[in-house]
Amino acid sequence: MNWNLETEHFVIRLPLADQDGDALFGLLKNPQVGAHLPRLPMFVSVQSLDELRRATMRFQAREAATWLVLRRSDNVDDLAAFQARITLQNINWMLSSARLQWELADDVKREELAEMISAVESFCFDELQLHRLELRMVPEAAEQRANAEALGYQYEGCLPAQMEFDERWIDQVLYSRLATDRV
C-alpha cells in the first residue's frame, strides 16, 4: 500500500525522519500554525526531529500516520517549504475510526486545504477502510472550525475539560465525517 498521495497541486508524503526536520521546524515554529490544537510551540529545530522520530514509531505500530504537504512547483524554494502537516492519529482498527488534524502554513487557502484533505480522506475511507474521521480543536479556533464545516465535517459538540494542557483543563470541540457522508 502506497501511503504517499498526489493531487493536482500538492505532493502529500510520509516524512523522512532524517531529512525533514528543518523544513518541519520552519512550518511549526509559527505559533499560529497549531493554535487550534493544544500543543506547545516549537522553539528549536531539534524538537521537530523528535516529532519525526515519534511519528515514525507510531506509524510502524499502525497507530498513526503523518503526512507532509509540498506544493508542486518549478520553484526550488516552494519545494523546500512544507504547506501543511496532516496527521491521522488514534487509529482504532476495531471501530474503523481515527482522529485527523492539520497544521497549515499561513498562505494555504481553504480551497487548497480541501484538495489536500480530500486526498487524505479518500485514502482513509477507500484504502484503510475507515468509517469515521474525527477532528478535535479548541473552541476559540473560529477559522479552523469554519474550515472543518466547509469540508463537510459535522459539529458534534463540545467535550468539556477534555485534556490537561499547560496546567489547565482544555475544552475541545468535536467534528466528524463518515465514509457514507461523501458524495
Image: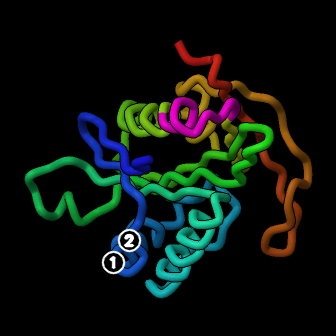
- The reply to whether the C-beta atoms of the residues labelled 1 and 2 are less than 8 Å apart is yes
Q: How many marks?
A: 2
Q: Is residue 65 left or right of residue 8?
A: right
Residue 86's x, y, as percent? 50, 52
Q: Is residue 106 visible?
A: no
Tag shown at residue 83: none
Q: Is residue 85 left or right of residue 148?
A: left
Q: Is residue 124 magenta?
A: yes
Residue 131's x, y, as percent? 68, 30
Amino acid type shown at disc 2? Leu
Question: What separation in Å lies between label 1 and label 2 (alpha carbons)?
Answer: 5 Å
> How dense is the environment of label 1, judged by Cα within 10 Å: few (below 14), some, or many (20 and up)?
few
Looking at the picture, tell me which residue is in the foreground, 60 or 14: 60
Would you identify the image quadrant in which residue 18 lies?
Answer: bottom left
Tag shown at residue 16: 2
The color scheme shown is rainbow
- Rendered residue at 54%/25% (across/down): 150
Q: Is residue 20 left or right of residue 102?
A: left
Q: Is residue 49 visible?
A: yes
Q: Please, which residue is most extreme toward the front here?
A: 1
Residue 32's x, y, as percent? 52, 59
Would you identify the image quadrant in which residue 68 lies?
Answer: bottom left
Q: Is residue 47 magenta?
A: no
- Rendered residue at 57%/63% (across/down): 59
* Helix, strand or loop for disc 2: loop
Amino acid type shown at disc 1? Gln
Q: Please, which residue is most extreme toward the left here?
A: 74
Residue 158's x, y, as percent? 84, 39
Q: Which residues are magenta?
A: 123-132
Would you identify the image quadrant in which residue 113 lies?
Answer: top left
* Helix, strand or loop for disc 1: loop
Tag shown at residue 19: 1
